[in-house]
Amino acid sequence: MSADGAKPRSLDREGERSGRLSFAAVRYHLTSFGCQMNDHDSERMRGVLEEIGYRESASRDDADLILFNTCTIRGSADDRFMGNLGDAHRVKRERPDVVVAVGGCWAQSQQRMVFEQFPFVDIAFGPGEVARLGELIARERIDSVGAFSFDGAFSGGLPARRDRPHQAWLQISVGCNCVCSYCIVPTVRGRERSRTAREIVEEARGLAADGVREITLLGQNVNAYGRDIPKDERATFAELLGMVAGIDGIERVRYTSPHPKDMREDVIRVMAETPEVCDHLHLPAQSGSTRVLKRMRRTYSRERYLDLVHRLRDAIPDISLTTDLIVGFPGETDEDFAETLSLVREARYDGAYTFIYSPRPGTEAAEEMQDDVPAEVKRERIQALVELVQVTARERAQRFVGSTREVLVEGPSRNDAGRLRGRLSQNITVNFAGTAEPGTFARVSITDATSTTLGGVEVAALAAARG
Ligand code: 5AD
Ligand code: SF4
């Protein structure tokens, strides 16, 4: 906080003459990094702030509160954040009254060291403390504050400001009990904790009543859901999927990210038998080499992973599969990498996120293994992988061309406002000519495909044009 201790801005009451309690427009600027879990936490941060009278400002220069929701999954996430934090420092030098708050995974990884390294930061808090944001801001008037526990309320219960009217995330669990040797998430998000099925279904009903048509269930290891809840009180993940899918008004249910080791047969069955549960699965493989998977502590082999892929394809023939892959893990040989390439061919992914291994301080891989794959080799490998994924995805996308599909309309197309944008159950974006309203389903004749998007024409619109 500023040296004089006086913080004259924030929450000054106005409007008393009219007898209404309202607040002067105090403004916040939020930058969110990282995964969907963070995006979802950011919706909650916006909701909490707006409930206590803050309004969002388009620029840091106009903000009373500069807030970051950070990620630390790879070194590149830290680097991106550092650039932005430098900009906040500039604003703080110009206007010492501005409050700088840093939440999320990077903050959790640094804890109180944040204040030593970056003395201009007023508030630092971990991803488990989103519910306390209002309280932290109030306390900051007295002293700089840090909060890093994992036992706070689920952010899923907080007010939210959602920017997509027909689609919503729903957090079903937080934390992760896995011990993947490269991964910082268990350190920064804590152990797995599940919300009760009753709470989740209640939230889903509320979303449906608000006009939401598509819900994505979120958890760091989403399909491990419920293991921390007493047996007689818990629903299985498969049951939970069925319950959410059964809610009136909910037309689509997705979930992310599952761990292959926790992918049970009953979940595959519910996916196959429940029309509302989408035909898409993001199934992180990380590597195609059993030897590397073992060193990553993923607890499955290449063969077991592929067996799961084949069972999914047998049960849900039209499923689209996407994945995460890491290249350059310590000890990865040319042969190991060739196995990752062949996994991509065999699993026939519709898309993949590809990453160069990044040692994260404190993880087993960073502390106990040599980061021995040369940078040049890592670059070559990722390039070859990206090219193969693109080829595979483009081939896969061709299966839609010439067919008519249901598209949930999201709004105008991003690069052509005259067209509409929506998504298939398979999670592939379709840009199309048509007149359907956002939040409704359009029947779209698919006419063309790239590796990432499809193009088409709404069937009714097509009939009108012909007629
Ligand atoms: N280096 C590179 N990629 C990583 N991921 C997680 N940790 C690391 C790391 N240390 C990738 C994994 C994970 C995705 C979210 O990020 O592929 O599934
Ligand atoms: Fe980043 Fe992982 Fe935290 Fe998500 S959970 S914000 S990916 S570090």
Image (spheres, rainbow, N blue to C red):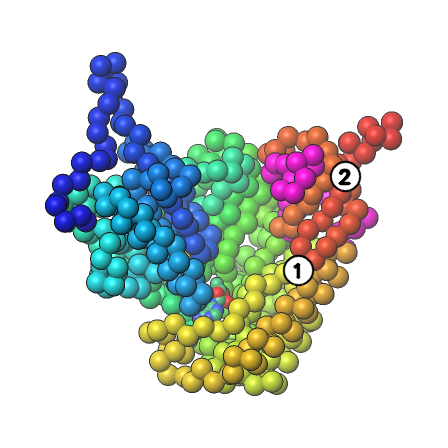
The answer to whether any part of residue 159 appears in the image is no
Q: Secondary structure at mark 1?
A: loop
- For the point 45% across and 76% down, which residue is it? 297
* Residue that label 1 marks: 350
Q: Is residue 281 left or right of residue 224?
A: right
| Residue 70 image point, x, y percent | 37, 56
- Residue 196 drawn at (x, y percent): 37, 48
Q: CA distance from mark 1 to mark 2?
A: 22 Å
Quarter of the image for residue 45 reads top left
Q: Residue furthest right?
A: 467
Q: Does residue 411 lie above or below 85 as drawn? A: above
Residue 457, label in figure: 2
Residue drawn at (39%, 54%) of the image: 84
- Horizontal and vertical percent position of residue 116: 21, 63
What stretch of residues is rendered in magenta? 399-426
In the rendered image, residue 160 lying in the magenta stretch gets the answer no
Q: What residue is shown at x 23% (from left), y 35% (from top)?
A: 10
Q: Nearer the viewer, residue 29 or 294?
A: 29
